[in-house]
Image (cartoon, rainbow, N blue to C red):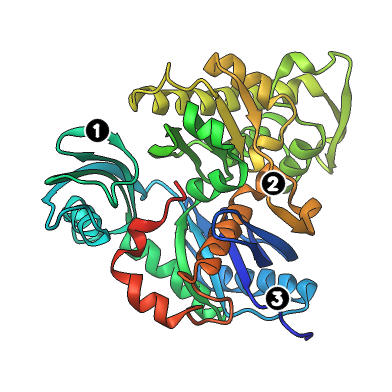
Amino acid sequence: MSAQPHQLVAALDLGSTKVTALVAEATGDVRDPSVKILGLGVERSGGVRRGVVRDIEETTRAIAKAMKDAQRMAGVEVGTVYCGIAGEHVSGRSSHGMVSVTGDEIRTSDVARVNDMASNVSFGRDHELLHAIPQDYLIDQQAGISEPIGMTGSRLEAEVYLVTVLTSALQNLRKCVERAGYHVGEFVLESLAASLAVLTPDERELGCAIVELGGGSTNVSIFHNGKIRHTGSLLCAGGHVTGDIVHGLQVTQQDAERLKERFGAAFEPLVPEADVFDLPSTPAQGARTAHRRVLAHIMHMRLQEILEYALDEVTRAGYHDRLPAGVILTGGGAQSPGIVELAREVFAAPARIGVPGQRLRGLADSVESPAMAVPVGLLLYGARQTVTGNGFAAGGRRSSQAVEKLINPVKRWLQDFF
């Protein structure tokens, strides 16, 4: 192995169909962190389903293989990774806290106290807090304050968005990573990570929804006024599209995936009626062909249903008519031709595909895909933590022991990613 760069960061995306690993060097400064991508590893795996480990041995194998490939390409070794987490076991809620200000002006300790007060709620015995994200602050009942430190007031209130996860799911994911020989620096909600990779500041401010079309689940997150306001997970996902193709065209699961990627389309009107493709032959059926319109119809119907469920989620959250920036599509399902046209039709709003690209150097062209939004976002999250001295260096230790000791009690409140 060659000499290692000073600030390595590694990301691990444990999806329902594959494990993706990225290794990069954190560059830039605190205000504008960026990454130089050094290595990429992708390994197919069925060990995780909807964010929950179903097969520890299979998941461990896939993690080890993907990380090994990424490190070999990068020419470096890492010990710590930032790992994504998602699934229907993830839930979010808003919470309110209020404290009296102790001095003449609001200090960091006051902000920490009010945030801790807001997060001091019961999550049940089987859930734990993943993220606590400050939304807005009020000083003496004056709302709309994003940074209260240094201001004068006698009463400080906070609205905090709390993201919780199933404790056993978190522990099993950690166990797989550790069995593969790595340490989890931090778990990050996948939709939040994706937002770092694909959203612009204007989209966050105006209001938009990220719809991550994964293989095992579809994740929806809503951003407004620069902050995340809602997150949810849907059971209907890309795996259902594949299953429909299996039954509709009478092919195997593997062939259905291949046909979906090669000939599929998410918007039926885009496909010419005369287009025909060959189906895999079997001893019982012989040589067969099918119209692409038939395949497109199968995909169109199921993807429309998935997007309608996503729209229902947005509507329940109260943001149906409050997303001027529209819908940003990520995940493997966002690679289907015509998905933007279908999303525009379903949401009656602007839509685009979220492709990572900004603040990336090195092997940036290898991650220019909506399927890479989560792992790239994890890298950017880790880079921000690393350059501020508030995260884990990829070698497995905190990058600054002194800074960690100073800010650990309030570190989760000082993160302004979301």
- The residue at 24%/33% (across/down) is 143
Q: Position of residue 119 (x, y in %)?
A: 21, 53
Residue 123 appears in the figure: no
**Mark 1–mark 2 contact, CB under 8 Å?**
no
Measured Cα–Cα span from mark 3 to mark 2: 26 Å
- The residue at 78%/86% (across/down) is 1
Q: Residues within 10 Å of mark 2 (few under 14, many from 20)?
A: some
Q: Residues within 10 Å of mark 1 (few under 14, many from 20)?
A: few
Measured Cα–Cα span from mark 1 to mark 2: 33 Å
Q: Quadrant of residue 382?
A: bottom right
Residue bearing mark 2: 358
Q: Name the mark nearer the viewer: 3 or 2.
A: 2
- Local SS, label 2: loop
- Local SS, label 3: helix
Q: Nearer the viewer, residue 180 or 55?
A: 180
Q: Nearer the viewer, residue 7 or 124?
A: 7
Which badge, 1 or 3, comes first in the chain's sequence? 3
Q: Position of residue 200 (x, y in %)?
A: 59, 37
Q: Position of residue 130 (x, y in %)?
A: 35, 58
Measured Cα–Cα span from mark 1 to mark 3: 50 Å
Q: Position of residue 26 (x, y in %)?
A: 64, 66
Query: Label 2 sits on what residue type?
Result: Gln
- The residue at 69%/41% (across/down) is 355
- Local SS, label 1: strand
Q: Is 26 left, or right, of 176 in this rendering? A: right
Residue bearing mark 3: 68
Query: Label 1 sits on what residue type?
Result: Ala
Q: Quadrant of residue 11?
A: bottom right
- Relative to 100, say whether 230 is above or below: above
Residue bearing mark 1: 143
- Relative to 366, say whether 370 is above or below: above
Which badge, 3 or 2, comes first in the chain's sequence? 3
